[in-house]
Amino acid sequence: MVLPYPLIDSLMMFFIYSFIGWIVEVIYYGITEGHFVNRGFLAGPLCPVYGLGFYAALWALQSFKENVAIVFFGSAIACTTVELIAGLILYYSFHLRWWDYTEYKLNFKGFICLRFTIYWGIAGTLGVYALHPAVLNLIGVMNTPVKFSILTFLSLILVIDIIASVANTIGFAHKLQAFSKVSATVRMTSDFIGGNIYDTVDTVMEVEGPIKESYDSYRKLVTAHKAEENELAKKHRAEEREYFQKFLASGKDAAAIARDSASEKMFSVVKSFNVFDKRLLKVVNVGKIPGTVKGGVVSAYDKALKAIRFDYFKSTITKSPTKMIPEDPTTHPEIADESTGSV
């Protein structure tokens, strides 16, 4: 089994991420419960579940750093798996729960749940792309003797803390007084660090409280104004549509009146035509213009009459225009032959 990093560096990462995880727990429960909670099985400021879970995610995802989706889901799965295994071991070994998700939806026996799986995915993604490079730089500036000295001290404290925590859990603390004294000292140190962290969080929350309330009031006011603006805009659009419909109706009525008036006037003009008027038009318009009748040409006179008789009146009256214009030559005896122009 090949580790993604040298063993000494891997152990340094375990302690660093366990400590960061403990800080996250203190901040989270300080915000949600309103007081300092020294989370975890151990007395010291470490949450090994975080160290193991994040290192497992780094191990599994070292070849997929270019794909954010794989990093997110891989971190969520790896950390949730470690959390489930650790929860089962602690529960069946000591019959105690150090965390319980039974109140959350989609949980498995209280050991894991969907909400914290998503949290793991977000934390793992941020860790891979932001936190882990900084940790690598920190470890890189240390030489091997310094790393070895730090790991020796931390490992010794961790072993004593584990022994004392287990003894205290199963009721053998009085038989391991030396370990218990060391564990108590570690607990005092852990409480001191955690208390300072919580005080900082509490101070930030006190300062942020009025700001958050003001921002919430501002958001509610903006939402109310947007709703009022939307209602007013709807009202205005309805009024505009109603006015425009009235305008169209009045325009259609005016166009119909104008058309009927023009039709009446044109009809009057056409009815007033007699043989003399037609003859005058024929005499004046003797020229030929291109047309579609047989021969390829048509007189201006014939085209004018066609436009007056058919093109205009076909959309306004049903009676044939030819029946509206009397053209009986017998009513004008003074005209002998219209085609020749003799009187």
Image (cartoon, rainbow, N blue to C red):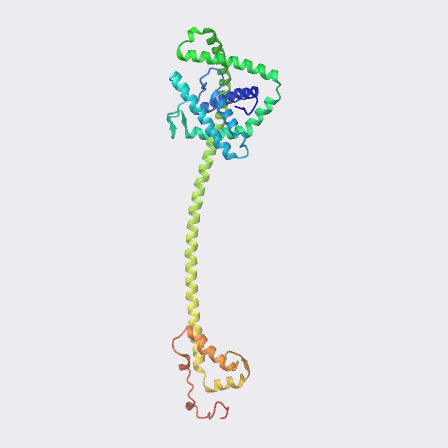
Q: In the displayed structure, would residue 33 be above or below residue 154?
A: below
Residue at figure coordinates x 52%, y 34% from the top left:
68
Q: Where is residue 276 in the image (x, y as percent from the top left)?
A: 48, 87
Residue at figure coordinates x 58%, y 15% from the top left:
148
Q: Where is residue 326 in the image (x, y as percent from the top left)?
A: 41, 85
Q: In the displayed structure, would residue 86 be above or below residue 233?
A: above
Can residue 211 be seen here? The reply is: no
Q: Which of 40 and 258 is in front in this view?
A: 40
Q: In the displayed structure, would residue 9 be above or below residue 220?
A: above
Quadrant for residue 135, please give it. top right
Q: In the displayed structure, would residue 232 be above or below residue 6?
A: below
Quadrant for residue 62, please give it. top right
Q: Where is residue 274 in the image (x, y as percent from the top left)?
A: 45, 85
Residue at figure coordinates x 49%, y 13% from the top left:
159
Can residue 147 be seen here? The reply is: yes
Q: Which of 336 and 9 is in front in this view?
A: 9
Q: Position of residue 208 (x, y in %)?
A: 49, 28
> Total label count?
0
Q: Which of 138 and 33 is in front in this view?
A: 138
